[in-house]
Amino acid sequence: DTAVSQTPKYLVTQMGNDKSIKCEQNLGHDTMYWYKQDSKKFLKIMFSYNNKELIINETVPNRFSPKSPDKAHLNLHINSLELGDSAVYFCARGAGRGPRHNQPQHFGDGTRLSIL
Amino acid sequence: AQTVTQSQPEMSVQEAETVTLSCTYDTSENNYYLFWYKQPPSRQMILVIRQEAYKQQNATENRFSVNFQKAAKSFSLKISDSQLGDTAMYFCASRPNSGTYKYIFGTGTRLKVLA
């Protein structure tokens, strides 16, 4: 099941740059998420979109902006990258509302972002 | 507020033995799901097993089973006949079945299966 496709897998860039991570899901689920996993493996939700509508927006710096052009995509844009942004970022889909509420969450393979 | 606590940062088990990973949670919701995810060194997040809170019967998936104690808000994972491929980080998570459907993850337990 390659339901969530995330690119790139690795991203190395310099402080101050702007970068994007793309995420696509192919099962028509309404809900998509972005998570950040830090060096201690702690996994924390950043954003959730349901049918292109922002549902969850945790206390994330406004340098991070999710963009959902359609239900199948939820891209993450990060401006003015800082050293502390180094982490693995996971996109996930699933657990939507309505008849799909019982679907488990499935993750992409993650993007390791390294800031030099 | 939801919380998920995994009190064992690291564990090890001999190959073919059984190991139990602990998880406790707190939620004010009546209807929710509980999950165990596995993250091997490849960093993929893989769903191991899930439990619907309104179901009393413990979920099982092959060598993986849970001990769900709703009153105690406990959701432990038992791995039987441990295999080297079970070496991974294991995350417990909860999710309400309403509202934002927000997942809360525990801090993880690093499991090492020894040959």
Image: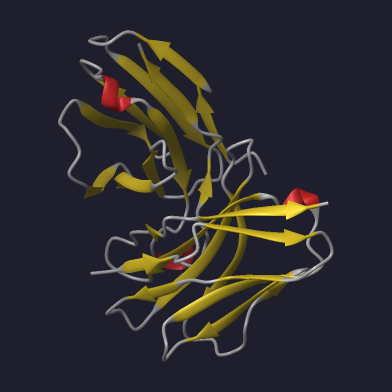
Q: Nearer the viewer, residue B105 or A99?
A: B105
Residue A96 locus on image (x, y percent): 41, 58
Which quadrant is the N terminus of chain A positioned in?
Answer: top right
The residue at the point 38 percent across, 44 percent down is A33
Residue A50 locus on image (x, y percent): 33, 49
Q: Is residue A63 visible?
A: yes
The residue at the point 25 percent across, 17 percent down is A81
In the shown orientation, is residue B64 left or right of residue B10? right
Q: Is residue B44 above or below residue A13?
A: below
Q: Is residue B52 visible?
A: no
Residue A70 locus on image (x, y percent): 37, 34
Q: Nearer the viewer, residue B59 or B18?
A: B18
The residue at the point 37 percent across, 10 percent down is A13
In the shown orientation, is residue A111 left or right of residue A83? right
The residue at the point 41 percent across, 22 percent down is A113
Residue B50 locus on image (x, y percent): 57, 69
Q: Is residue A92 above or below residue B36?
A: above
